[in-house]
Amino acid sequence: MVFIFGVNFPESRLVARSLQSFYGIGPQVCTRLMARFHVHKTAKVGALSDRQINDLAAELSTMTLENDLRRQLQQNIKRLRDLGTYRGRRHAMNLPVRGQRTRSQIMTARKLNKIERIG
């Protein structure tokens, strides 16, 4: 087991997959991180050197991830609601915020918006 940023990962797991398990790290950020620390895209967690693991953990600690990112997202939505902006009202009514169609797909839009914003 390899300990990265507070989580134990099995040694047979891919580095890219383990990095993307953190909330806030997607495919592009993961690729950038792996390129920065010279990790091949098919490398396993067990094949990383101690220095690479420490560098990755240090870089992850400087980024806004997990609960901090979720909290920041909720604060941004709350700020929009308090200001009374159009986007804030759409969030409050659980309607699509970015101009999607609501005439024929309103129930799907409400369901997806609610799940996405709870985080």
Image (spheres, rainbow, N blue to C red):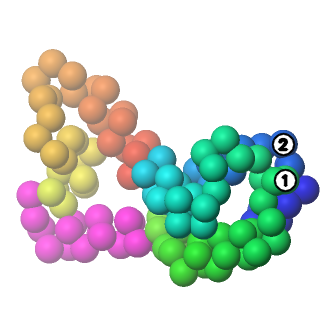
Q: Taken as a whole, is the magenta stretch helix, strand or loop?
A: helix
Callouts 1 and 2 close, C-beta under 8 Å:
yes
Camera-side residue of 88 and 72: 72
Could you tell me residue 103's position as x and y percent? 10, 23
> Element type at marker 1?
helix
- Specify the amino acid type for callout 1: Gly
Give the quadrant of residue 19: bottom right
Which residue is most to the right?
Answer: 1
Could you tell me residue 7's position as x and y percent? 77, 62
Residue 94 in view in this figure = yes
Per the image, the residue denoted by label 1 is 46
Q: Give the answer, above or below, for where 54 lies relative to 36.
A: below
Stretch of the chain drawn in magenta: 71-86
Give the quadrant of residue 52: bottom right
Mark 1 packing: few (<14 Cα in 10 Å), some, or many (20+)?
some
Query: Can you tell which mark lies on residue 12?
Result: 2
Residue 28 among magenta residues: no
Could you tell me residue 8's position as x and y percent? 83, 59
